[in-house]
Amino acid sequence: MSRFQLNKTKTSCRTNATKTKTEEEERFSCVEITAGFMRVMVSRWILLLFSCLLLSRLLTLPQLRNIGRAYHQWAPDPASSRLIMPEPSVRDDKFVEVPQIVWGLNNQKIALARAALTARKLNRTLLMPNLSASLFYKETDLLEPLGFDQLFSLHRFNSLCDGFVRISSMNSSEFSDVFVVAKGNGRRWTAERDMAQLEECNTPEIARYTVIKLEGKHPFLWHDHWPIVDYARIFECLVLVDNLSAQVSRVVSKLKSLSSPTGIEDNEIRMSPFMFQPKYVAVHMRIEKDWMIHCKKLEMRSKARNGKDLRICSSKEEIMKRVANIPGLEKPSVVYLAVADDLLEDKTLLEGWSGFLAPYEKKKLGVMDIYSKYPYLIQSAIDYEVCLQADTFVGNSFSTFSSLIVLQRSMRINKARDCEGSTMASYAYNIEGPAGGPQRWATNMSDLSLAAISYGSNEVSCM
């Protein structure tokens, strides 16, 4: 090979080597540029995602806080309640039987809780009592019995109150060893004597019996030995049976559909549940003729005995005015009027309300068919749940029905804000509050008895 050819070959090799190196550098550069581009894109996507999450949180945080407050379970104060202490399981081989429970829904719920707490005191299971479907006060022979499990779920009760109290579906006739205890009557039968009788039932001579049957006056009239938190725990265990819960949902759905803004479709509401929440106000109106007679007598009796002017009675006009003056009430607002239709004589119930309030009773709401097929007790139970679930509740502080609703609502809100926030707010329309509105109302959960709730009071803990 000539020198020229050799030099040409060497040059060609160097050129090829240079090309190869250049191509490798270009490929490496391209990979590096691509990787850099991907890093930038990923960073931007992460930043965008973080921004969206932050914006979503800022938009929904107030609603989430409200929802959290609405369903916050109240925790009893360790210094004032025995509920947080470890409790032994209730015996399921010893029982207590009580007389048929009578009167209105609120009286029957209190009587039922008092019977269960009595059984708890004796470390026994309560045999499932009969409630009363009809509303009779004196004609006891006309009372229509209603089994506990026809109104409340027995399974849910025992599940929620597990370890605290228990109800059995068994009957005392299934046992041969039954010890009968007659509950005392009259003014001489004091709370101390009543408790001594219960203590005696725990002595070995009586405790050996499988069933202790308590006879005499019905449990609502028994002496009260337990703090309000014990009652509250039992009330939370009283869940309606499924078919009645479904009827409550129908009524609540109708009220919320009326409060939905025009043009918002149901599917849009379901897609953005935190951006739109239909609300309604429930008012327990005590303006029936028998109530007005009763409350006037109570006011006169208080004036004569104590020289105090109790505010118990409220006319329809006063109720309407105070509801309209509730601070921060949304405009417009749907207002459900919970009234005893059979006892109401005023046919102008829906007239005279402020323009931004849209009042509905059962007939106008189109749910009369739901209520009419049930006896009085079940009608009251449905109304109770509708009021309990309302965003704002307004009642009479001397009404036991209203008081029990406020008790349960007080348990379900953040105790630190129950007199400040708007979530699950409750008011007493018979007591004037700021700006001519009703007084804010929450139950004093540290009370040592249910007396204030059972017999009415002007003492509301938000004053």
Image (cartoon, rainbow, N blue to C red):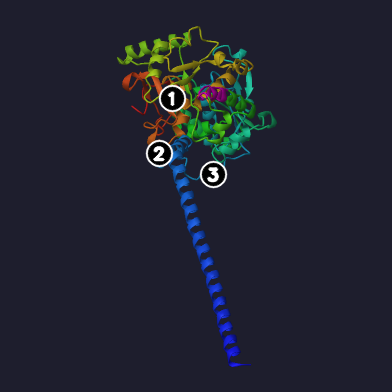
Of mark 2 and mark 1, the one earlier in the sequence is 2
Pick the residue in front: 262 or 379: 262
Is residue 117 at least partly visible in the picture?
A: no
Tag 1 residue: 453
- Asked if residue 260 lies in the magenta stretch, the reply is yes
Most frequent secondary structure within the magenta stretch? helix
Badge 2 element = loop
Q: Are marks 2 and 3 in contact (CB under 8 Å)?
A: no
Callout 3–callout 1 Cβ contact below 8 Å: no
How many residues crowd mark 3 within 10 Å: few (<14), some (14–19), many (20+)? few
Residue 78 counted in the magenta span: no
The residue singled out by tag 3 in the image is: 88
Between disc 3 and disc 1, the foreground one is 1
Considering every residue shown, the one lying at the far right of the view is 174
Question: Is the Cβ of the residue at disc 2 closer than 8 Å to that at disc 1?
Answer: no
Give x and y (percent) for residue 159.
Answer: 59, 38
Secondary structure beneath disc 1?
helix
State which quarter of the image contains the C terminus. top left
Where is residue 378 drawn, in percent x and y? Answer: 59, 21
* Circle 1: residue type: Ile
* Local secondary structure at mark 3: loop
Range of magenta residues: 251-262
